[in-house]
Amino acid sequence: MDQKIIDIKNVTKVYKIGNIKVNALNGINLEINRGEFLSIMGPSGSGKSTLMNILGCLDTPTSGSYLLEDVNVAGLNDNQLAEIRNIKVGFVFQTFNLLSRTNITGNVELPLIYSKGKSSKSRRDLISKVIDSVGLAEWVRHRPNELSGGQRQRVAIARALVNDPAIILADEPTGNLDSRTGEEIMAIFQSLNRQGKTILFVTHEIDLARHAGRIIYLKDGIVTGEEIIKDPINAQKKLEDMPKLEDKINSIEENALL
Amino acid sequence: MKRILENIKIAFKSLALNKLRSFLTMLGIIIGVGSVVAVMSIGAGAEASITENIQSMGTNVITITPGREQVFTGGGEVRVEAAPGQGRVFISRFGEDEDEEFAEEDDEEIVAGELYLEDVEALKEEANLLDEVIPFLSSMSIFSYMSWSGNVSVTATTEDYLDFAGYELEKGNFFTADDVSNSSNVAILGYNVVSDYFGKTNPIGETVKIDGKNFKVTGMLKSIGYTFGMSPDNSIYIPITMAQNKLYGIDTVNQIVAKVESEEVMDDAIIEAKATLRIQHHILPGESSDFEISSSAQLLEMASTVTDIMIILLSSIAAISLLVGGIGIMNIMFVSVTERTREIGIRKAIGAKNRDVLIQFLTESIVLSLSGGIIGIGLAGLITGVLSAFTNLSSPITASPVIMALSFSTAIGLIFGIFPAMRAARLNPIDSLRHE
């Protein structure tokens, strides 16, 4: 199979707001290889979200071509796009976007409901496997609102993994989390990447972006630069160096005693 | 199939989250379906009971009443002229003057004739196709026994009536041909009359008063139930001559009923009876008869027409309730789609096709409406159950209104759910995900 999972050429996106045309993307070229961990960095309004929507097949480009595993997505209709999203893309959102009234199992099962041809046994096995892999086996019966932010994001990752997609798209997945929990999420992504998953990660924090092997810089709808990270930050190591919250509290208490 | 079950499960879950709202939304359908099914069942029950009554009398019965002939015009429409003669018994009790007024009216207007015992005799003699001919004179009269009194329906007739109507005696004997020819003051009491006025006392041999005249009770009937909305159980039977000569002072009868040998000769029998009575009443050819003859088949038809009209009328009122209920469902489904925009966005982002979302919301509205329908059928069962517990009208819920109600409520869920579901299906996933 081709080494390139994603190949977009000269992609533009123009929004019409009333009579005014807004160019969100002005000719983007981007290739992503299988097994890569890529960060996209850019300030607000740089076109990050628009690019993510197009990469995630939630939207189609105004012009240009987009090959996702050699399929030209640019010309597909709504239903075909839905199928691609279901099978080839795993989304992880900043705001988690879980179904609040459905328990963890139900949330993780969601992509499977919309894809055909899996027996209910293999479905159950798959669900418990991915829930295990993000360390939430004890929480399957709980609803999202009973979980912490970090746990919710892990549910979202499990949901993104369940259909074994070609690429995981994470849109500021640590944006709503504290730095330690964010680092834990990054550790999960890095571990998934080591297992061979292709991950695309959008952020506006350089420290987070440096967890990836390559950074693409985006501004005003064009790619302004690219950086290969030879020695990405190892989230697991960073976590070990980070003082745990309880340690911090203990040390504060000790200081107070002194 | 599995997808459908999953959708139904999702629908029940989301309806259960807003229990009160779901119930209130269903209420329109519950009331609509409940009343349609109840009305149809009660109507069918009433029709069946009327039919049964008419048939228990026999489908080979003709009824002759005074008044102008029924004129059948095109299209099966029936024009019935007023029959003033029928009111005569009641009026004659108030005074002779009104009798004369009627006589005058008869002269100038139309031949609104009367029926006499002689007519009965003539029919017995001349009309060979008639087996039994029985005259009636019925009225409401004041009945009293010891210090109790009240209004009771009095049927004056001949000794043949008991056999003709198929009633049975609980105690004593029916009056005899001798009682009729002698105008004996004897009375046969209906079952309820006995229990109301005598309690457990044996009424046989007791003396009662009807409109102030003394009668001796010689028999009582077994309980019979309702016939034509009147109960023989609440009636008293006396010899017709007694009523004519001593009670009301008239020589006419209310109506004559007769059994025809068999149903096949019904038409001939009617022609024969008509000819006999026209001769008896000296009606010239070309003049219209001063009496009407109707067969039980005609009665049956009329009764079923009347109940059908009632059913249609009441059902259409109930159908309006269904329509309002459907609009309620549509309204709540629109609210639900707006509330769950984000959920729709998530589902679409994760791979739900427009069709999947459409089916999800459509299932929800159908489940809502159909649940309402099922509860409505239960409600109808309750209504008819209570009704048959307190009245003699038995109206079991049959399959056809239930099937109709179920398919109607499914259709309502479908029709009124399709627009909200289409709105949900068409939502743009990007915008929906941003929705708060």
Image (cartoon, rainbow, N blue to C red):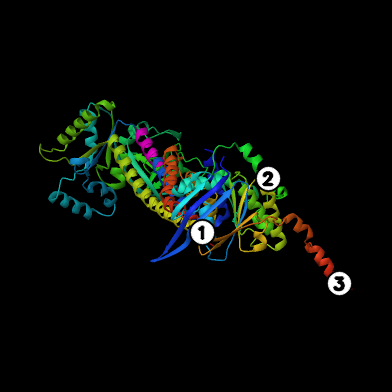
Q: In the rendered structure, are the residues bearing label 1 and label 2 in contact, judged by CB atoms less than 8 Å apart?
A: no
- From the viewer's perspective, is the residue at label 3 or at label 1 nearer? 1
Q: Residue at x 45, y 53 (%)?
A: A64
The x, y position of residue B250, in whole percent, is 25, 45
Is label 1 in a helix, a strand or a loop?
helix
Report which residue position mark 2 lands on. Answer: A195
- Protein chain holding label 2: A
Looking at the rendered image, the disc whose residue lies closer to the viewer, 2 or 3, is 2
Residue corresponding to mark 1: A50
**Residue type of the residue flagged with mark 2:** Gln
Specify the segment rendered in magenta: B45-57
* Among the two numbered marks 3 and 1 on one chain, the one whose residue lies closer to the N terminus: 1
**Image location (x, y in percent) of residue B293:** 23, 37
- From the viewer's perspective, tell me whether residue B347 is left or right of residue B229: right
Q: Is residue A56 left or right of residue B102?
A: right
Is residue B54 inside the magenta stretch? yes
- What SS does tag 2 mark? loop
- Residues at marks 3 and 1 touching, judged by CB atoms closer than 8 Å: no
Do callouts 2 and 3 mark residues in contact (Cβ within 8 Å)?
no
- Chain-order first, disc 1 or disc 2: 1
Q: Is residue B334 left or right of residue B252?
A: right
Q: Is residue A195 magenta?
A: no
Q: For the residue carrying disc 2, how many other residues have a C-alpha within 10 Å: few (<14), some (14-19), or many (20+)? A: few
Q: Which mark is residue B98?
A: none
Q: Where B250 falls versus B275 (above or below)?
A: below
Judge by depth and name the residue closer to the eye, A209 or B424: A209
Q: Is residue B373 visible?
A: no
Amino acid type, mark 3: Asn
Task: Give left or right: position of B227 versus A174.
Answer: left
Name the chief secondary structure element in magenta.
Answer: helix
Which amino acid type corresponds to the residue marked 1 in the rendered image? Thr
Q: Which residue is mark 3?
A: A255
